[in-house]
Image: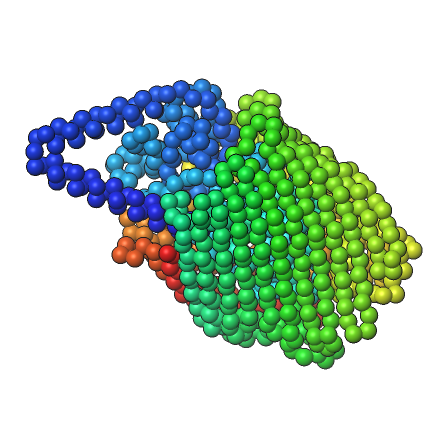
Amino acid sequence: MMGDQLSVAKGNWRYRLVVTTALSMFAFQGALAEAKASEMSEIDKNQELAQAAEIRNFNIERQQLADALALFGQQAGVQVSANGDLVRGVETPGVSGELSTEAALQQLLAGTGLSYRLGSNGAVTILSSAQSDSGDEALTPILVETNTHADDHLGAADRSNSVYVTAEDMERRNPQDIKQVFAGESGVSVGGSVPLSQKVYVNGIEETNLAVSIDGARQNNKVFHHNGTTLIDPSLLKAARVDPGVAPADAGPGALGGSIVYETVDVDDVLAADRSIGGSVKGSFNTNGGTFTNDLSSYGRAGNLELLGYFKWAKGDDFEAGDSEQMPGSGADFRSGLLKAAYDNDENRFEFSAEQVRDSAERPYRANMSRLIGGRPVPLERLYDLQRRNFAFNYSMPNAQGLWDPKVVLAYSETDLDVPDPEERNGLTGSYSGKIENDFNLTERDVLTGGVDFYHDNAKYSSPTYTTEEVATNVGLYGQARIQPLDPLRLSFGLRGDTQSVEGINGEEFDENGMSGNISGAVDVNEHLTLKAGYSNVWGGIALAENFLQNPDWDYSAGLKPVRAENYTTGFDAFYEGFTFNAGLFRSVFDNVRSPTYNGGPSITNDFETRGYDLGAGYNWGPGFARVTYTDTEITVNDSAASSYATQYLGAPLGQIIAFETAHRFDGSNILVGGTMEAALENTDTVDAGGEALESYEVFNLYAEYQPEEAEFLTLRVEVNNLFDENYASRASYGQDFTDVEPLREPGRSFLLQAKAQF
């Protein structure tokens, strides 16, 4: 995502070098030219010192350094440049008060192990300590222009537990599916080895119990328990944010166990500010399955207008698992596209996006498992034709300050699944949704967000013999306060009320309403330690039944109960001289989660609970970093140990998971190397539920990336995934605890060769 900015930064650096060299050569031709050059140098130096000494008001809270630098540039009125690898994962204690630019910068970088250089006209370049000592500036700077997380409330107390996947993370990880988007995050697990069957779990809670949005559009994608939930092409994404457990009131309705926010790429993310048109082409080949993937994009701006188009297709055969056994129904037949148009005059931004993802390959008869042993005879594979579409209109005032900072979202999303065998059947879920909200910026650090949102969801099933449909309409009113009453204390608290109407397949209606509340706090004990905690009590209404489970003979006389969840989180973050440490406890309790069955009726509910803890440590040494996270999660259903069958649409028995990520960029060589590791320890919780223990596994993935100096528009990449050819199923995949289920195995060792050109 940052490739264009990187290329532009490199080009500007070389341009300045050429100009400087030329001036030096001319200076040798006469004393007059030398005197003039010296005079200009003295003027630049005086300008630099004057701007550095100018007193300004700074108010930047503790947060990720990349985002703090963007704010610093705005508040200081200077250009700030930093290499993405240099600041990735680094936190700053912040800076507050009336200070000179240089004094504020020193406070901002305190404890980070980084230094800076002031250039002409006050421009700031962030450096490693080694670069500062040697005077070397080998790491090419990337201009820090905007919030890298696309989050207006970054640094608020309710974001203290959030997991961010930035544009830089996307570029580095090069994800081919949603599992790789969250590589290195032990608290976010993804089950399923093909995109159609993948589901996301946050601290053991399935995404159907989270508020999930794409470009602000609510996602209502629960169609069939044998496929996944939200099919996403990560190539379309610029960022993702996960709010585990406690989510704010403005996260939207249904944020029972937190929220997931996906943002697709904009023109400004891929096109440098001084260019009007650009494009890219990317091709890759995966040796395991012989899958070819091609990406094409074109984008540009004319005045205040922006336009971006993207198309991708992938085609390949079934892959082999770690034991060299070919996995039936694992081939690729995938297409995706994004069209985005915007009008932005710096005061108002109007944006429309249209996105579609389609997986139309042959899959196992039951797509969330490889096969059922000893069941009724069925074909090994059948067609699943899954399409997810998303249309969103967004209005905002990007540079608004004060009490008027509005946002408007109007959207429609749908998931359409055709399963023609054994008979033509279709499941269609759709959601019309929207919100109108305003940020009342009471002070620079105290914000009150208030608004109203709505959704109109439907879940429809069609077959040659009957058609069924459930419909739900919800209107919510909410407010969330994010304040800092004391310098070390940040608070966030909110309240929302929802009213909902649900219509069953027989036309019977149910009207419900409820209140939800949340509170989060973060205390910056000193520049090295932050304590944090949160609590929420969330009313989620009545969830629509899965399409393929709907029975035209259902009797609703027993009524439908709304779901409610309580979430608790607590922990700390610590950092010192590039080292980071964190630990936390979490617990979520759900009551009356709707769990209907075809023959059991529409009114069945279950209670479930997830609890556990997470640990993390990392080190950033400038051109590289390393980070390890560990999460231990336990899930119970109706106060008992649970199998992967009992936890469907609730969560998953994940147990202990370790994730590791590292990367290093070699100075001056345009070479980036890195890798990820995921390990799952043996989990015997499923034995208590009457099943088999979940086996342990360790998987290592490595990559190397190179940009030739003579062709900086080109990026070459090679990956080796599952380096040691581990034969395993992802811990979040269904059925591993049953003797009569062969789960979906992950691909064995594979090599990915990729080339990308940007123009």
Q: Residue furthest right?
A: 557
Nearest the eye: 511 or 299? 299
On the image, the x and y values in percent for residue 286 come to: 45, 68
Place residue 704 in its image quadrant: bottom left
Please report the residue visible at 58 percent of the width from the left and 62 percent of the height from the top: 357
Nearest the eye: 418 or 485? 418
Relative horizontal placement of residue 129, taking residue 370 as reference (left or right): left
Q: Is residue 609 visible?
A: no
Place residue 370 in its image quadrant: bottom right
On the image, the x and y values in percent for residue 178 come to: 56, 57
Above or below, 62 relative to 666: above
Specify the color scheme: rainbow
Please report the residue visible at 60 percent of the width from the left and 45 percent of the height from the top: 394
Relative horizontal placement of residue 460, taking residue 676 as reference (left or right): right
Nearest the eye: 495 or 414? 414
Nearest the eye: 553 or 198? 553
On the image, the x and y values in percent for residue 449 come to: 64, 33
On the image, the x and y values in percent for residue 59 come to: 49, 26
Place residue 539 in its image quadrant: top right
Q: Is residue 15 visible?
A: yes
Number of marks present in the image shown: 0
Q: Residue furthest left?
A: 30
Please report the residue visible at 45 percent of the width from the left and 57 percent of the height from the top: 298
Above or below, 62 relative to 557: above
Quarter of the image where the C terminus is located: bottom left
Please report the residue visible at 41 percent of the width from the left and 25 percent of the height from the top: 104
